[in-house]
Image (cartoon, rainbow, N blue to C red):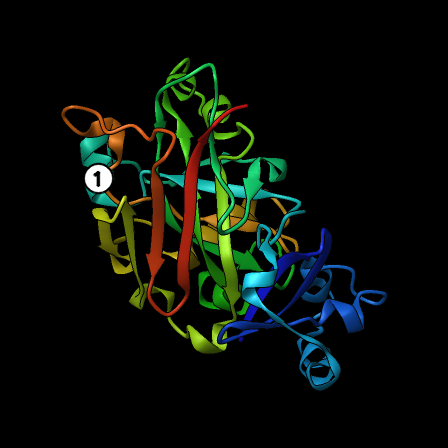
Amino acid sequence: MKLGSVRIGGLASYGIVEGEFLIDIGAVLQERFPDLKAVIAADAMEAVKLAAPQAPRIPLQDLTFAPVIGNAGKIFCVGHNYESHRQETGRAKTSYPSIFVRFADSQMGHGEPIIMPKVSTMLDYEGELAVVIGKAGKNIAQADALQHVAGYSCYNDASVRDWQWHTTQFTPGKNFAGTGAFGPWLVTPDEIPDPATLSVTTRLNGTVVQSQPTADMIFPIPQLIAYISTFTHLAPGDVIVTGTPGGVGAKRQPPLWLKPGDTVEVDIPGIGLLINPVHAEA
């Protein structure tokens, strides 16, 4: 099942994506479950399915996609989780994943613009697989980790590199408004029984700039969930953005920076195609 968070006529809703339509579940269940995060937290997927026959069908062209989980309590991003990216950055091998955080209000949905801030011209793409937590947990064992997943999505962890490089801490360059593209929708685990069989491809203006199977992750998804849940309690709607393959613009010669007028696509077959134009900050 594909579940999207959307805006219809300016009003927030959510629903099931089928072909070129959204079954507007929010129109039926929003009083009980105000958003997709609430559905996940209540483990209410059966209620969603039961509501589908009475819900209106909205053409996708008549709505705007929002971030899949726009109100995530915690968003963890993983640095240098593919060997190709570790090597191009010159980072030393480590025994533990590199974790930083992104704020929920820096995100936007499929089709919405990535914003190049006025204070920088070093805006970079990072296509990634995102994992949404469905079942709360602390000290989760790797063997049980995938049972805590509500679904998977595409992510573009766009990075303002000069602000990222001000110090050894990544936070400033990873949290400018309009730089965390998340979508187009969530795909439930019944359609993705093994996330290690996927692949992540990023295209800039139609040209492939990143492409790698998720099996090449240094720290696979079960290990990431186990590690993160050791130092914090994972809650429904939390997001883990699992790292980007090699090929980022900052490490090309010459560097390949995003600019207004560009279009970036993150393509994960079996999940979806996340497309975002690049605009200058107004």
Does residue 100 appear to the left or right of 11 in the view shown?
A: left
Is 122 rendered above or below residue 166?
Answer: below
Instruction: Judge by depth and name the residue closer to the eye, 55 or 76.
Output: 55
Residue at left 53%, top 63%? 186
Q: Which residue is mark 1?
A: 247
Residue 163 x/y as whole percent? 43, 18
Tell me the residue at 16%/23% (across/down): 254
Which residue is farthest right? 31
Q: Is residue 254 left or right of residue 224?
A: left
Question: Camera-side residue: 20 or 89?
Answer: 20
Q: Quadrant of residue 274?
A: bottom left
Q: Nearer the viewer, residue 213 or 181?
A: 181
Residue at disc 1, secondary structure: loop
Identified at 25% across, 32% down, the residue is: 249
Q: Is residue 89 above or below residue 14?
A: above
The residue at the far left in this view is: 253
Q: Is residue 249 left or right of residue 154?
A: left
Q: Quadrant of residue 89?
A: top left
> Type of residue at label 1?
Gly
Q: Is residue 90 visible?
A: no
Which residue is at a point 26% across and 27% down the rendered structure image? 250
Residue 282 position by quadrant: top right
Percent x, y of residue 6: 63, 57
